[in-house]
Image (cartoon, coloured by chain):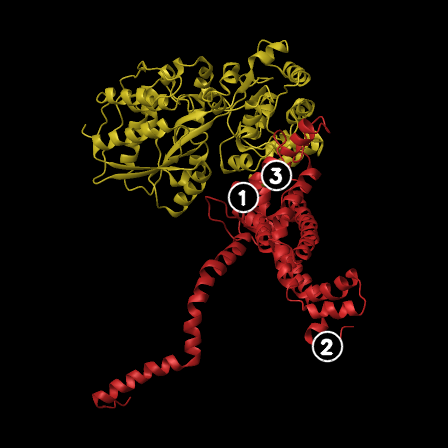
């Protein structure tokens, strides 16, 4: 088929770009990504097609370079012009909203986690491409399916490009000095560790302030590790539960062990406190480790730094979510097939693997076979991020993803529930009831 | 209808005079001259304001057109402790910060009104906090109040050894509230000081000379000459100051984002948090609209309470 995308040309070009662009740990050896021979969906490309897309700005420069060179190869191959614009993280939601409401603008937007679920009426289905990619690359990982498919259906409305999580980050030497070889996986042990770290003068620190990423990460972890959840599988509010109250009581004990002032922390505060060796244990994305490693002044701290999954508590797997890049194609696009072909092209191993390598671990793959990517064979301290999309928790767990689950995250409802108990502004029961009241407002329709 | 034929030169003359007459017609001229200004006001002021008020009566969210829901948003806000908290802090913040700004600003104005070397240069320097973009000064204060890296904590703990722990400026409600007020006062003083200085310079020195001849003390000269003469400008400056303070957004959003646990939300930051971050545009607009009665009241108060003295209108002061 003329418009089918062949994948066997230009491997050399892709890898040389990757090897040139990859930073830090990325290996020079080509990855050995298995790909099953599956018939690609037939996507007859519209006459005169050209595409415009938005995506969030890069973490690292090679991300942008490789993404652009991949897009250019698509243009060279198909003759379809692709204009890629990189948008600030703060702006991408608003721009998506305007695009969806006005029915004009970019054909494709790579937004964050819940965006396709919010604008589902304005999007075309991507099931054919998603199913093809899933079969070809060993299946979609759990979070990818969760964020890609419309709730309680097998219809794909988003095409996840990768995710980034926030596991524990700790100082090996300090944890060992406190008498632990790693961070305990149970609540009592974790509290014990935090008490000992506090006594040693290098306490733990987790954001309880209005920090979108870190604050929500900590609050969700605490809630989930006690078996609590915002919603049940049908989307009914279950936040005001005895599990929640248990979690709140635990945080009340835990909070005094933290370094002072975590109720006013924002997303960078824990990075700064950790980098200046004020704290020995926190939770953060991969960026903290890289910033330590790439600065000679702090390289020693990086050497002593380990990552570990968030302690499970009573949960079966580590209660961690992941911020997901989620691509969507709008109904208003005059060239839906070209858009789908482009996304498919970008997810094929000749393009996707170099891009994954260029990101040096900031983004983790949504498709199982990419676990073999060379990006994960470099620095062993990054390997933990490989399985980010295998996590079984998401914002709004256990319910369907909706506008309201995103709003609750952005309005810090869970963070403030924990912070109000930690600071004695409310009893656990009051805080859980207040969170339910605020959540009800967002879920009223 | 009768058709009158006229010689062509006469027609041209008549047409010209028709145009000339049109432009000489006062109502037409007024409309023409005002149209650009009214157009600008309508597009950039009336429309956004009207849209904001309209949104307050709908349940619009980001990503979804809303429907008219009447007073539902306001009814919800009345039952929402976070809104009441924001109302309380907005009033408290405005009252304390305005008092602080006027006390210190008036004092500074009196000092600057004296003769001293480098007078103009110092007056210019005083304006600096006002000139610096708010976001920049907010970031500076954010560092000053940081729980780990505060310069104040550093001085007290590591240099002077007066304390053993860092000060937790923003971690608990009341210290956070007063920290923000202090930052706002710092930022607002120059505006008050320079405006009042301008007022002070309009007071005729002969009044002071006459008072001194009558044996008035410095305090009496301030109480019976400076203060009453400053009343009109005080009223104007206070009105502006109250409006600026009550609608403050940047300082609070950059330093605390309304935290810890919503204890420092002003109505403006709460409106943004709900409307933009939380996506509930209708509710955010309702919070913003709920500021209007407070602002109208504050404006009327400072206008009628301070500005309208009978002696200013040529009557006796009783």
Q: Percent position (x, y) of residue B81?
A: 67, 43
**Residue B103 shows in this picture:** yes
Question: Which residue carries the number 1 mark?
Answer: B135
Instruction: Give me the C-alpha separation between circle 2 and circle 3.
Output: 57 Å
Instruction: Tell me where residue A102 appears, x and y as whole percent.
Output: 39, 47
Write down which chain is painted red: B
Residue holding disc 3:
A438
Label 2 vs label 3, nearer the camera? 2
What residue is rendered at 57% in x and 39% in y? B140
Mark 3 and mark 1: Cα distance apart in space: 30 Å
Looking at the picture, does residue B228 appear above or below residue A246? Answer: below
| Number of numbered discs on residues | 3
**Residue A364 in the image: x percent, y percent?**
41, 22
Residue sitting nearer the eye, A26 or B260? A26
Identity of the residue furthest to the left in this view: A2
The correct choice, above or below, for A192 with respect to B166 in the image is above
Asked which secondary structure carries label 3, the reply is helix
Q: Residues within 10 Å of mark 1 (few under 14, many from 20)?
A: some
| Colour-to-chain, yellow | A
Do the dots labelled 3 and 1 sit on one chain? no
Question: How busy is the neighbourhood of tag 2: few (under 14 within 10 Å), some, or many (20 plus)?
Answer: few
Tell me: A1 left or right of A445. Answer: left
Q: Residue tagged by mark 2? A: B315
């Amino acid at each position: 088929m003329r418009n089918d995308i062949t994948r066997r040309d230009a491997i050399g070009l892709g890898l040389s770009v990757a090897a040139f662009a990859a930073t830090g740990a990325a290996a020079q050896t080509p990855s050995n990504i298995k790909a099953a021979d599956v018939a690609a969906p037939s996507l007859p490309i519209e006459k005169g097609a050209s595409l415009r897309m938005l995506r969030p700005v890069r973490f690292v420069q090679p991300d942008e370079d490789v993404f652009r060179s991949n897009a250019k190869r698509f243009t060279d191959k198909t003759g379809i012009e692709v204009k890629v614009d990189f948008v600030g993280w703060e702006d991408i939601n608003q721009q998506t909203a305007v695009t969806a409401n006005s029915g004009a603008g970019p054909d494709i937007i790579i937004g964050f986690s819940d965006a396709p679920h919010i604008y589902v009426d304005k999007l075309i289905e991507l099931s054919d491409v998603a199913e093809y990619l899933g079969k070809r690359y060993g299946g979609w990982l759990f979070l990818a399916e969760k964020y890609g498919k419309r709730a309680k259906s097998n219809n794909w409305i988003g095409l996840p490009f990768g995710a980034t999580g926030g596991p524990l980050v700790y100082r090996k030497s300090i944890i060992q000095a406190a008498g632990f070889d790693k961070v305990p996986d149970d609540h009592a042990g974790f509290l014990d560790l935090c008490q000992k770290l506090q006594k040693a003068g290098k306490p733990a620190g987790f954001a309880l302030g209005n920090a979108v990423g870190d604050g929500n990460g900590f609050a969700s972890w605490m809630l989930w590790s006690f078996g609590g959840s915002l919603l049940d599988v049908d989307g009914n509010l279950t936040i005001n539960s005895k599990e929640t109250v248990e979690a709140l009581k635990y945080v009340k004990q835990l909070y005094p062990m933290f370094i002072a002032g975590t109720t006013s922390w924002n997303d960078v505060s824990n990075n700064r406190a950790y980098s200046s060796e004020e704290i020995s244990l926190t939770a953060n994305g991969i960026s903290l480790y890289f910033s330590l490693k790439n600065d000679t002044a702090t390289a020693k701290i990086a050497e002593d730094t380990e990552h570990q999954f968030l302690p499970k508590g009573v949960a079966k797997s580590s209660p961690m979510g992941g911020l997901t890049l989620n691509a969507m194609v709008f109904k208003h696009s005059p060239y839906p097939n070209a858009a789908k072909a482009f996304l498919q092209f970008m997810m094929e191993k000749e393009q996707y693997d170099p891009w994954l390598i260029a990101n040096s671990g900031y983004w983790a793959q949504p498709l199982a076979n990419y676990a073999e990517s060379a990006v994960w064979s470099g620095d062993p301290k990054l390997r933990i991020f490989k399985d980010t999309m295998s996590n079984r928790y998401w914002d709004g767990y256990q319910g369907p993803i909706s506008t309201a689950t995103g709003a609750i995250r952005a309005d810090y409802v869970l963070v403030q529930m924990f912070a109000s108990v930690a600071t004695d502004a409310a009893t656990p029961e009051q805080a859980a009831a207040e969170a339910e009241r605020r959540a009800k407002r967002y879920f009223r329709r | 209808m009768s058709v009158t034929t006229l010689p062509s030169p006469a027609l041209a003359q008549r047409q010209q005079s028709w145009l000339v007459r049109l432009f000489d017609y006062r109502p037409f001229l007024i409309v023409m001259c005002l149209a650009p200004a009214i157009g600008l006001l309508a597009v950039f002021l009336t429309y956004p304001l009207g849209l904001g008020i309209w949104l307050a009566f709908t349940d619009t969210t980001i990503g979804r057109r809303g429907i008219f829901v009447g007073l539902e948003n306001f009814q919800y806000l009345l039952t929402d402790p976070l809104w009441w908290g924001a109302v309380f802090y907005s009033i408290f913040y405005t009252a304390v910060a305005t008092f602080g700004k006027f006390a210190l600003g008036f004092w500074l104005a009196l000092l600057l009104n004296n003769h001293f070397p480098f007078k103009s240069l110092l007056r210019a320097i005083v304006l600096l906090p006002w000139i610096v973009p708010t976001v920049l000064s907010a970031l500076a204060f954010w560092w000053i109040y940081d729980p780990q890296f505060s310069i104040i904590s550093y001085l007290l703990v590591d240099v002077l050894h007066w304390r053993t722990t860092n000060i937790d400026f923003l971690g608990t409600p009341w210290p956070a509230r007063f920290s923000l007020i202090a930052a706002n006062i710092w930022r607002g003083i120059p505006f008050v000081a320079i405006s009042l200085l301008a007022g002070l310079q309009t007071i005729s020195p002969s009044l002071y000379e006459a008072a001194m001849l009558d044996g008035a003390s410095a305090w009496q000269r301030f109480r019976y000459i400076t203060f009453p003469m400053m009343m009109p400008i005080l009223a104007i400056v206070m009105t502006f100051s109250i409006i600026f303070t009550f609608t403050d957004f940047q300082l609070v959003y950059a330093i605390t984002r309304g935290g810890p646990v919503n204890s420092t939300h002003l109505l403006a930051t709460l409106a943004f948090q709900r409307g933009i971050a939380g996506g509930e545009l209708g509710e955010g607009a309702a919070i913003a609209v709920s500021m209007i009665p407070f602002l109208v009241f504050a404006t009327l108060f400072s206008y009628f309470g301070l500005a309208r003295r009978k002696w200013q209108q040529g009557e006796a002061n009783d």
